[in-house]
Image (cartoon, grey):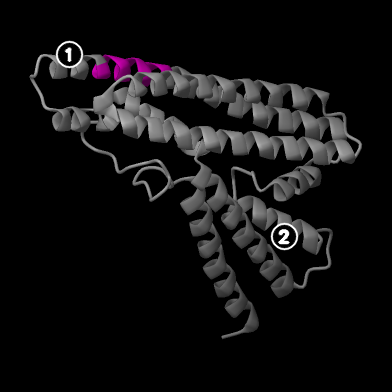
């Protein structure tokens, strides 16, 4: 088998590995859950709102962001391999190929250095590049607006669930153990919300770092910072919803 054929097979193999790494981080983090993630396997009893919340929270999962960074690293290694195998001295430099591979490894782009360098590779003009970044943050903000709306629906349902369980406990219709079992979904929803808040905070921190990198490079980041400010307000809104359900849980011994 010739050198070209061997190289082709090697590229295909590493492409598959990089893709698997990125998909594991950016797509499949939430459904089955994992220890410490605040997510459990989907039960048949999820309400439509609860399932919608889980779907909407997925892009902001803390574990998803971490795995995306791993996917970006795998993609970068793929870019280096392609460069060495092709020994190409044309317009694309080794740096460009590493960035292309890294971008493929983490579509979410929140490995900040990779994201910034890839945008700089795409858009040489500062204003055009910052506008592209603003569009990305705005997309995050739009997704978060939908997530906050769904969170409020889920919390409203949880408050009704808590009130009904309290009524049953007062009337001695169910035991404390049964009440705790009935409210397991409330606790599960709260864990999910906490994990999501941490993920969103990390996302906001990433965007702040990205803005700082661009500002140091001489770009005008006022518009980007304004959009990031909207993201920060949404973090505060999610924390307010978490505080609301925490008060409900604290006032309900059976939910502890």
**For mark 2, does the 10 Å Cα neighbourhood hold few (<14), some (14 to 19), or many (20 or more) residues?**
many
Where does label 2 land, which residue?
A: 98
Question: Does residue 152 appear to the left or right of 160 in the view shown?
Answer: right
Lower position in the chain sequence, tag 2 or tag 1: 2
Q: Main secondary structure of the magenta part?
A: helix
Q: Which of the numbered marks, if any, corresponds to residue 195?
A: none
Q: Nearer the viewer, mark 2 or mark 1?
A: 1
- Up-down: is 203 above or below 254? below
Q: Is residue 230 magenta?
A: no
Question: Which picture quadrant has residue 248?
Answer: top left
Q: Secondary structure at mark 1?
A: helix
Between marks 2 and 1, how big is the CA–CA gap? Answer: 61 Å
Question: Does residue 211 appear to the left or right of 248 in the view shown?
Answer: right
Q: Which residues are magenta?
A: 152-162
Residue 76 percent across, percent down from the top left: 67, 60
**For mark 1, does the 10 Å Cα neighbourhood hold few (<14), some (14 to 19), or many (20 or more) residues?**
few
Front residue of 64 and 179: 179
Front residue of 126 and 112: 112
Q: Residue at x 41, y 35 (%)?
A: 192
Question: Does residue 254 appear to the left or right of 246 in the view shown?
Answer: left
Front residue of 45 and 182: 182
Q: Which of the numbered marks, if any, corresponds to residue 167?
A: 1
């Amino acid at each position: 088998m010739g050198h070209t054929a061997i190289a082709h097979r090697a590229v295909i193999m590493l492409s598959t590995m990089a893709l698997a790494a990125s998909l594991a981080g950016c797509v499949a983090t939430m459904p089955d859950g994992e220890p410490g993630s605040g997510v459990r396997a989907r039960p048949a009893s999820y309400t439509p709102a609860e399932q919608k919340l889980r779907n909407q929270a997925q892009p902001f999962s803390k574990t998803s962001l971490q795995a995306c960074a791993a996917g970006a690293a795998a993609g970068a290694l793929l870019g280096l391999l392609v460069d060495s195998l092709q020994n190409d001295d044309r317009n694309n430099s080794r740096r460009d190929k590493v960035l292309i591979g890294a971008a493929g490894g983490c579509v979410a782009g929140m490995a900040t250095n990779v994201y910034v360098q890839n945008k700089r590779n795409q858009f040489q003009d500062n204003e055009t590049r910052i506008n592209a970044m603003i569009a990305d943050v705005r997309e995050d903000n739009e997704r978060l607006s939908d997530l906050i709306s769904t969170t409020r629906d889920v919390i409203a349902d949880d408050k009704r669930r808590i009130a009904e369980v309290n009524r049953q406990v007062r009337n001695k219709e169910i035991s404390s153990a049964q009440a705790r079992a009935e409210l397991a979904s409330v606790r599960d929803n709260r864990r999910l919300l906490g994990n999501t808040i941490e993920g969103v905070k990390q996302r906001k921190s990433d965007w702040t770092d990205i803005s700082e990198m661009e500002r140091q490079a001489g770009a005008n980041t006022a518009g980007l910072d304004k959009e990031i400010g909207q993201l920060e307000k949404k973090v505060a809104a999610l924390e307010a919803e978490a505080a609301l359900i925490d008060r409900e849980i604290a006032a309900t011994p059976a939910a502890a």
